Amino acid sequence: MDVKGVLGIVSFDGEWITITKKEVGQQQRQFRIRAADVTGTRLKPGTRLFHGYVQFVLPGSAPAPESKGLLAGGRPPMSDPHSLSIRRSANGAAAKLVAAVEQARATP
């Protein structure tokens, strides 16, 4: 299950979440998180004016704060390895991915 985001993609294979980011002028970075290690998920749907985001919270760490300002639109900073900005067109796929991660977390 894949969700194409802004400058990246989030994939979930049933056990592992893979976030691949490609920032402008940077090399591609990949972060892997085991679904069983996730303590919470956050989904802010994108709108016509602003991108939304998908964020995964891990034990012992607080969720990255939303950046304030007109250009940030209330998203975590691009440097946060556990989140990815999404367009409005990806809202449905992102909701399905978050539901699948939540279901995987619930099963031992």
Image (cartoon, rainbow, N blue to C red):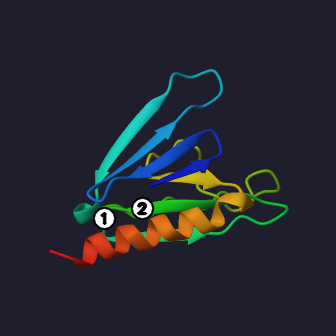
Q: Quadrant of residue 36?
A: bottom left
Q: What residue did someone put label 1 on? A: 38
Residue 108, above or below 37: below
Residue 53's tag is none
Q: What residue did someone put label 2 on? A: 56
Q: Quadrant of the C terminus?
A: bottom left
Residue at horizontal 84%, vertical 63%?
Answer: 48
Residue 95 locus on image (x, y percent): 54, 70
**Nearer-N-terminus badge (2/1):** 1
Q: Quadrant of the N terminus?
A: bottom left
Residue at horizontal 73%, vertical 53%?
Answer: 72
Residue at horizontal 56%, vertical 31%?
Answer: 22
**Residue at far bottom of view:** 106
Label 1: element kind = loop
Q: Quadrant of residue 99?
A: bottom left
The answer to whether residue 95 is left or right of residue 89 is: left
Are dots 2 and 1 in contact, CB under 8 Å?
A: yes
- The residue closer to the viewer here, 79 or 17, is 17
Residue 44 appears in the picture as rendered: yes
- The residue closer to the viewer here, 19 or 64, is 19
Residue 33 locus on image (x, y percent): 31, 51
Residue 46, above or below 108: above
Q: Disc 2 residue type?
A: Phe
Residue 28 locus on image (x, y percent): 49, 27
For the residues labelled 2 and 1, the Cα–Cα distance comes to 6 Å
